[in-house]
Image (spheres, grey):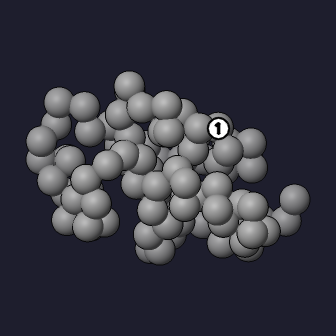
Amino acid sequence: MAFEVTMYSSNYCGFCVRALRLLESKGVDVTEFNVDGDRNLRKKMMQKSGRHTVPQIWIGDQHIGGCDDLYRLERAGKLDSLLNINN
């Protein structure tokens, strides 16, 4: 069973779209929180991640980081094991 994936995102963020496409290509359901116009939600994301940019991605309780971090894991062959999937 795959771990829960959570992503804070924005409607106007190409990196968010790229990250979501990669995760969906793995068959992963993503719980997405849109921070557009929601200061409290963005503040919560910043407190949890220590970062102010979107996307911010978690696999289970592990903070992955942003889109570049996600793709770095994919290129290193580590993303599937973090997601607990066998493709």
Q: Quadrant of residue 50?
A: bottom left
Whole-percent x, y for residue 44 in the image:
19, 57
The residue that mark 1 highlights is 21
Q: Residue at x 49, y 66 (%)?
A: 64
Q: Residue at x 45, y 62 (%)?
A: 65
Q: Residue furthest top?
A: 12
Closest to the observer, 13 or 33: 13
Q: Which of the image's four quarters has the C terminus?
A: bottom right
Q: Which of the image's four quarters has the N terminus?
A: bottom right
Q: Residue at x 64, y 62 (%)?
A: 72
Whole-percent x, y for residue 18 in the image:
59, 38
Q: Is residue 86 above or below residue 44?
A: below
Q: Residue at x 49, y 31 (%)?
A: 14
Q: Is residue 54 above or below residue 14?
A: below
Q: Assess disc 1: are there few (<14), some (14-19) or many (≥20) residues with their C-alpha within 10 Å of its C-alpha.
A: few
Closest to the observer, 48 or 4: 48
Q: Is residue 3 left or right of residue 60?
A: right
Amino acid of disc 1? Arg
